Structure formats: structure tokens, C-alpha cells
């Protein structure tokens, strides 16, 4: 399923593809590609269809995270590859109530340049949502990503408790993770 959502390009917002193609065509107007990207899906007709695609992606994302957490395997959908808005409040979508403003993007930040493992979900500060638009599903996505973060930390950072230096480094990384989760 993760491979399918990647092939369908559901990990990115549709409006980004239009801008990407315009930039490519503008910069290389006289050049043709021998291989073109295949577009499996037509552009969404309205915001409801766009939200349906978001929700399909986010459900696959959640399954990927839960499988990774349960098995200790690597993620199939890395956070760095995702540029998708979080889903809107369910009743707004079910009642086909148009959104007052777009929902926030799923974002992450690295804690340090040498350690890209520690990532945290943050909302796009320039794209604040109306509180009524954000609800359980978006919070579940963020909470699951944080749980995945914690699991990856304990799987990827072994500690030798008999070596004081190793223990100090591990504890420093752990405190960094804890601060991110508190924030």
C-alpha cells in the first residue's frame, strides 16, 4: 500500500505538482524528456475529492507507522518525503462544508545535523488552522508519528551502561527527544 500511494503521488498536495511542472516547462522549454512521469490520477475535481485523497494517504501512513512500531522495521514512508496537509475535521468533510482556510501541513524538524533520526511533527506556523477544522484524525497522525519517533530512538540508539561517556551521550539525546515531545 505504501508503494501504491507513492506511485499515485498521494504523499504530496496536488497543487504542488502543477507548480513543479510549470517551473520545469519554463526552465527547459526547448528540451523534451524521453521518459515522462505517468499520472495515474486526474487532478481532484473539488476540495472533497482532495480531502478523500488526503485521508487515503494518511490511513496508509498510519498503517506504515504501526507496522514499523510493532516490528521494529524501518519506515516505508519517511517523514522527509511527505508534503501533505493534515486532514480536516471529520464532520466538515462528511457534511461537505467548505473549509474556511486550508489545513496545516504535516511538518518535521531535525534535532541536530548529525542525527536525522530524531524528528518531530510540527504545524506550519504560517498556515494556522481554524480550531474547528483540526480534530482527532490530525492529532492521531501527530501522536503516531511521535510514538514512532520514540520507538526509533530506542531501536537506533543502543547504550553501554558501563561506559560513562556512552551513557552521557545517550542521555543527552534522550533529553533532546523528551524536550521535543514536551514542546
Image (cartoon, helix red, strand yellow):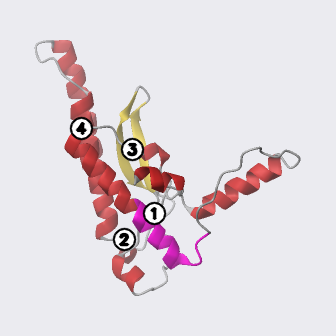
Classify mark 1: helix, strand or loop: loop
Query: Where is residue 101 drawn, in percent x and y?
Result: 50, 74
Element carrying mark 2: loop
Upstream in the sequence, badge 1 or badge 2? Answer: 1
Magenta stretch contains residue 48: yes
- Select label 1 or label 4 by which is in front: 4
Mark 2 vs mark 3: give the one in front.
3
Does the CB distance between marks 1 and 4 fall below 8 Å?
no
- Residue on which the image places disc 4: 72
Q: Is residue 12 left or right of residue 148?
A: right
Disc 4 + disc 2, Cβ < 8 Å: no
Query: What is the span of residues highlighted in magenta in the rendered image?
Result: 43-57
Q: How many residues crowd mark 2 within 10 Å: few (<14), some (14–19), many (20+)?
A: some
- Left/right placement of residue 64 relative to residue 41 reads left
Q: Residues within 10 Å of mark 1 (few under 14, many from 20)?
A: many
Image position of 168 (left or right of 7): left
Q: Which mark is residue 76?
A: 3
**Which residue does the image show at 15% across and 12% down from the upper left?**
163
Name the outermost residue toward the left: 162
Q: Between marks 1 and 2, how big is the CA–CA gap?
A: 9 Å
Residue for badge 1: 104
Q: Secondary structure at mark 3?
A: loop
Q: Label 2 near label 1: C-beta < 8 Å?
A: yes
Residue at x 72% of width, y 55% of height? 21
Residue 161: mark = none
Q: Which residue is mark 2?
A: 134
Mark 1–mark 4 Cα distance, whole angstroms, equals 29 Å
Residue at left 89%, top 47%? 30
Cα separation, mark 2 vs mark 3, equals 26 Å
Q: CA distance from mark 3 to mark 1?
A: 23 Å
Q: Position of residue 173 (x, y in %)?
A: 27, 30
Viewport quadrant of the N terminus: bottom left
Amino acid at each position: 500500500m505504501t508503494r501504491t500511494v507513492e506511485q499515485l503521488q498521494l504523499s504530496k498536495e496536488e497543487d504542488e505538482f502543477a507548480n513543479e511542472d510549470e517551473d520545469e516547462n519554463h526552465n527547459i522549454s526547448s528540451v523534451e524528456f524521453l521518459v515522462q512521469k505517468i499520472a495515474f490520477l486526474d487532478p481532484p475535481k473539488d476540495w472533497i475529492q482532495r480531502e478523500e485523497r488526503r485521508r487515503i494517504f494518511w490511513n496508509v501512513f498510519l498503517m506504515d507507522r504501526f507496522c514499523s512500531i510493532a516490528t521494529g522495521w524501518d519506515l516505508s514512508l519517511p517523514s522527509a518525503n511527505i508534503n501533505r496537509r493534515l486532514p480536516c475535521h471529520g464532520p466538515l468533510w462528511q457534511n461537505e462544508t467548505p473549509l474556511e482556510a486550508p489545513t496545516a501541513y504535516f511538518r518535521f524538524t531535525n534535532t541536530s545535523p548529525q542525527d536525522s533520526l530524531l524528528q518531530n511533527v510540527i504545524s506550519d506556523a504560517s498556515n494556522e488552522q481554524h480550531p474547528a477544522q483540526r480534530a482527532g484524525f490530525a492529532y492521531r497522525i501527530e501522536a503516531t508519528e511521535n510514538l514512532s519517533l520514540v520507538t526509533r530512538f530506542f531501536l537506533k540508539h543502543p547504550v553501554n551502561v558501563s561506559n560513562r561517556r556512552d551513557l552521557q551521550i545517550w542521555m543527552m539525546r534522550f533529553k533532546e527527544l523528551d524536550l521535543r515531545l514536551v514542546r
